[in-house]
Amino acid sequence: MSGHTDMVLVDEKGMRIDGRTAEQHRPIKIEAGVLNNADGSAYVEIGKNKVLAAVYGPRECHPRHLQDPTKAIVQCKYNMQAFSVSDRKRPGPDRRSIEISKIISEALEKVVLTELYPRASIDVYIEILQANAGTRCAGLTAASVALADAGIPMRDIVPAIAAGKADGHVLLDLNKEEDNFGQADVPIAIVPSTDEIVLLQMDGNMTREEFDHAIEMAVGACHEVYDLQKDALKRRYSKVQKEVSGDEQ
């Protein structure tokens, strides 16, 4: 995030380079149950981001020294495919991927009823197929739907979105240009039933007023994402119900 560019990211009318207003998120598409071989799965598009999440478990935790006799652990692996960005990324985990894997695991452990599965592991794999700023939020959003699709008991589903600042404006859901040349990026994830924040990071600089405004915008948008997550699961299970009732006839 450089903050220095000749590119106009927000014009004098408050319109952004992709035609959105400051408080609009990019188009979002969520599908549940997209992989047959996983216990649960989801596909999410947020703008040009394309993300696939798969869940396996609860199953016996390996290696065994990671087992917790009182609860399950949520192990997340976030991976950006080499072809997901225009300047080809080196394959394999890097520091950023390891950090994002950890914060997503921690966010999900806040909602999964891990105490029901002592010594178990719930394994979450997030593959970024195409990246355009906001992949950790898209990944967490997809992982939550995949967990619910796997039938894993949870207090709630976790939606995530980022707010930030570019050209001196507080903006919702930064795109790649805004993220690269803006002044701040604030990814956030919440538990919608309580508005408890389970992920909050900040890269860059904002005033206290700008930060509060960014959080308020992001929390409001998280509730919109939450509705789309629930809708994806409803569509998935109405389809399953039809298939089951069709088999019974």
Image: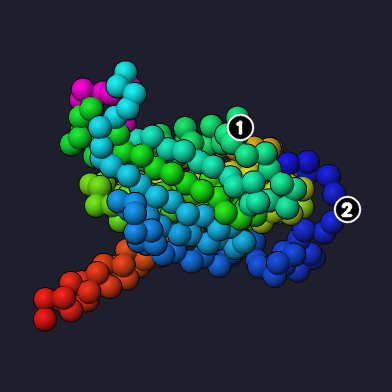
Decide which of 51, 173 is in the foreground and name it. 51
Q: Few, some or many C-alpha atoms within 10 Å of disc 2 (few <14, some 14-19, many ≥20)?
A: few
Q: Name the residue at 73% across, 41% down.
A: 1
Q: Is residue 163 above or below residue 62?
A: below
Q: Which mark identifies residue 153?
A: none
What scheme was used to colour the molecule? rainbow
Q: Position of residue 29 (x, y in %)?
A: 48, 66
Q: Distance between the residues labelled 1 and 2?
A: 31 Å
Residue type indicated by callout 1: Asp
- Identify which residue is drawn at 32% across, 71% down: 235
The residue that appears at 70% across and 67% down in the rendered structure is: 18
Residue stretch rendered in magenta on the structure: 66-73
Image vertical order of residue 123 relative to residue 158, above or below: above
Q: Is residue 220 visible?
A: no
**Quadrant of the image containing the C terminus:** bottom left
Residue 38 to residue 243: above or below: above
Q: For the residue labelled by badge 1, is the local secondary structure a helix, a strand or a loop?
A: loop
Residue 180 is a magenta residue = no
Q: Name the residue under label 1.
A: 94
Q: In which quarter of the image is residue 32?
A: bottom left
| Residue hosting label 2 | 6
SS label for mark 2: loop
